Amino acid sequence: GHDGTLVGGPLWTTGKLGQGLSFDGVDDRVDVAHAADLDTYPLSVAAWFKTSSSSGVRGIVGKYVAGSYNGYNLFLNDGSLCAWYLRDDSNYVYDGSGCPFRLTGYNDGQWHHAVYVVDASGARLYVDGAEKGSLGWTGVAGAVSTTEPVHVGCYPGAFGGAEYFEGAADDVRIYPGALTASDVADLYELTVRYVDNLGACAGLVPCHPTIMDAVNAAASIDTIEVFPGVYHEAVTLPRLSSLVLRAHQPGLKPVIVAPPGGGSAITTDTGQGVQIINFVLEAPEGAGVWATSGLHKALVIEGNLIKGLRGIDASGYGCTVRNNTLLGGSISFPTGTSGCSIEANRTSGGGIAIGGWRSAFDNVIRDNVLQGGGITINEETVSRNTVQSNLVSGGSIAVANVHRGESNVIEDNVVRAGGITLNGIFTDTTIESNFVSGSAGDGIVVGVSQGGVLIRKNTSIENGGCDLNDTSNPSNSHNLWEENRFGTKCGAVP
């Protein structure tokens, strides 16, 4: 879910599972910009690597710079495989040496799979599906807090010596959680299946003629890469965990999924860690992605162009819906959701809607451009949600029918065709630094509340304004209105 930048000129090459990168050991690396979820804890880092290097301290993958005592690192020291996890100079999983674990024999020029897992019990290092060593915590277990980028193929500083990896790497992954021994074994056995309706797959195997042929042959953890073309089939993903379905070499030519008989382009049943990435999905009578048939965990829908009546219909928790463009339809979670990131999407025919069940909490809705609808959260319990830096041109931001709303933040949004409305019981909720230029009767509306809503530094112009419904409720006097600028529609501010 995070893009990397090639630095120094690493070359694309045949990897273990598909395309990998070749590093020259001099100045080649990949940088992935810091993000809070890359400092996750517990943590699992996985990578395929191939090297013959026998000298120098050379990074494979890490979020660490030498001397910082803050971050994690999987690296080589004179050809031995090493790893550590450091919160600071008192709390760490580290044996005090320059190469914790010191696993030898994996610089033989062959592909090897390394997985480094950190949780409250300490750390475990797996190679080729088997645990090879473990270390316990010194001090207090917990997350790192480094803002260093993730580096692939480089250990910055590296004791002042060679820091660049010499060899090849493929399928680098960082998981927000501790993989089990069974998970690691499955990941080691992962198969990449290729789909090409022309039957070639550029010589890669196994090669399937249709997407569903590959899906029916796949197991959990497998990856299916689809070559460019038009695939007239409805894709249904079964209950498989961590199945990745993605376009092969995205950006060159599109991979179009267009079901011939209508309906949804891609349907996924209950699963964990399913990813749908970089497709063109044409479903004029259904959804581009329909994932509401069960409870999903860590579903990823990213980088797709969707031409669908319903856009994205999803459910579950811990999901990522990012960088999609919807030419029709909405991003909808009709049964609620929690812990989801809905970021940097663009819509021209709908908005973002969460509602119809019981709860929405710990969601982030950020940096979306919505030209055909607004943002609606309609749940009984709405807590710890962030709605931030969205451009809403086709509707309002509305949080309604809430029986319990706590610690929500609505900030830095631009709302051009509606207003911002809270309706229900809210405490410790903030509406701040938003710009509203809605139509008559819109603006900022705070409905029945237990108080504790802070409305600060907002600007509402044209026909928009502010309104406080149910002024007979004495608890509304606990809401704070500070430093707002309102148009003529606004009456006396409490």
Image (cartoon, rainbow, N blue to C red):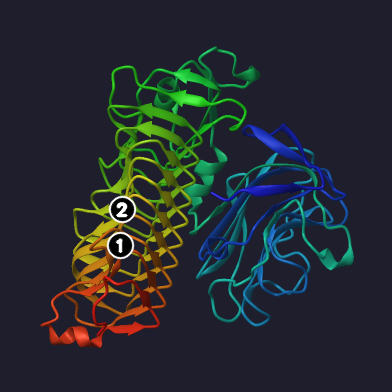
Is 52 placed above or below 156 here? above
Q: Residue at x 62, y 62 (%)?
A: 34
Q: Which residue is mark 1?
A: 419
In this picture, residue 492 sits left or right of residue 25: left
Task: Please provide percent x and percent y for residue 164.
Answer: 82, 53
Residues at marks 2 and 1, CA–CA distance in whole angstroms = 8 Å
Q: Residue at x 59, y 14 (%)?
A: 200
Query: Mark 2 or mark 1, which has the lower sequence index?
Result: 2
Labelled disc at residue 395: 2
Quarter holding the C terminus?
bottom left
User: Amino acid under label 2?
Assistant: Gly
User: Amino acid under label 1?
Assistant: Gly
Nearest to the observer: residue 113 or residue 320:
320
Q: Residue at x 38, y 51 (%)?
A: 393
In this picture, residue 346 sits left or right of residue 84: left
Q: Secondary structure at mark 2?
A: loop
Task: Please provide percent x and percent y for residue 242.
Answer: 45, 43
Nearest to the observer: residue 489 or residue 70:
489
